Image: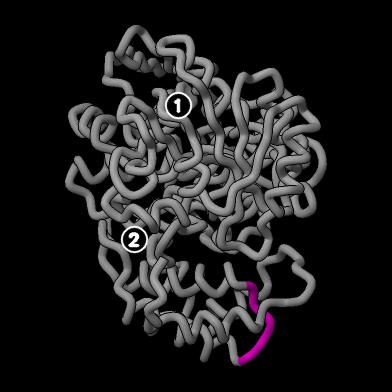
Amino acid sequence: MTDRLLPFDAPLERLKALHPKLIDLNLDRMLRVCEALASPQDKLPPVVHVAGTNGKGSTIALLRAMAEAQGLRVHVYTSPHLVRFAERIRLAGKLIGEDYLADCLNRVEIANDGQALTFFESTTAAAFLAFSETPADLLLLETGLGGLLDATNIVSQPKLTLITPIDYDHQAFLGNDLKTIASQKAGIFKRGVPALSARQPEEASQALERQALKLGVSLTSMGQGIDAWREGDRLIFQDEDALYDLPLPVLAGEHQIENAALAIKATLMLGVTLDAIETGLTTVQWPGRLQALKAGPLFEGLKNRASELWLDGGHNPHAARALHDFIDRRQARDPKPLHLICGLINTKDATEFFGHFAGLEAQITCVPFSSDAAIAPAELAKAAQSKGLTAVIAASPLEAIQALPHTPLRVLICGSLYLVGDCLALSPETYPV
């Protein structure tokens, strides 16, 4: 990561200082500051609003690739960033400029007038300013936390809402059962706006259906009106109108078929052509999510060029299951000694995370990374060992890689997007933005 002072660093730091000591999820602060900014949230291009626990970023990346293949100018808002803060805000296809971002943040600071405001609310208000002032055909808008009381939910009339797979995460804010979590996610539903949902656990599905019924929302769910599956090296997509034979998404992992299905149906509803959908499936990029590293110091640190090196920032139970499935499929096709290089932040249950890898024949190396919330490697190793896994510690991902044997290996760096961001910062040539 760069040490260069950026134009937006100072306003960001000042806005961080206004962060309320006790976070309460509500829209009052966001509505107040945006009203002082002349309500930019009401001056946006057509919005696709995306909530869920996992797959939001991948689904948005697929949507963006398909829409841009159609020639549309696409704004994108996602979080968190991996290396550069500007990754969160994409204006008509390009990352927001540093000076313009600083200007938007300064205007938010002036409008806020020193009152309490969360970091995410500050940056979302700045993003809405930029989106409202830059012509585009579409805005792909990702929620930060939940949906109902998320800062992005002041957009009153999106064109379409999407719910990606729901699982346990952020229980302190969203609730301890899937029904409650799903009800929070369904808070992005708006009367008269169609909604799409991934395949969900029964509890979550029922909660989404109840909210859709309450608002008179037309909800289409995977397995009920749309479906997709792999046949060999092709993706078969089916909806109420047709059956499509398409290329598989280039994003790794079987779970991407579900994300691709949501994106395909959404883009069809937006009028994107089949040719553009096919192009998007084969050109999409989403760094840090089962990304193969094939250059840079980490890859060069492997002693055998037949080794594989993967990066993945999945950090909750659903993501851990997807990672385990990916490992099982790779190992079944081409067995190699398996090494996981892991780091987690202290808001995640490390024992539960490693529980999803119990029984896996792998060595775990626990490493630090650049976050104050990082779990100490020794503590993380104990959590892995409590699940019967072999775990050691290292001072960095590079040191962990350099300590590996000379034989062809399968190495996965995983557990936290902060850790993934550190790794990508070392290898800018492997980091498409």
Residue hosting label 1: 410
In three-dimensional space, the C-alpha distance between marks 2 and 1, rounded to whole angstroms, equals 34 Å
Where is residue 308 drawn, in percent x and y?
38, 29
Residue hosting label 2: 90
Specify whether residue 185 is painted magenta.
Answer: no
Q: Residues within 10 Å of mark 1 (few under 14, many from 20)?
A: many
The image quadrant that residue 127 belongs to is: bottom left
Q: Which residue is drawn at the image coordinates 42% and 60% (left, top)? A: 83
Label 2 vs 1, first from the N-terminus? 2
Front position in the image: 48 or 232 = 232
Figure check: 13 above or below 45 = below
Q: Which element carries disc 1, helix, strand or loop?
A: strand
Report the quarter where the C terminus lies.
Answer: bottom left
Q: Which residues lie in the magenta part? A: 114-118
Figure check: 86 above or below 390 = below
Residue 286 in sight from this viewpoint:
no
Where is residue 228 drawn, in percent x and y?
42, 17
Dot 1 amino acid type: Arg
Q: Which residue is drawn at the image coordinates 65% and 48% (left, top)? A: 344
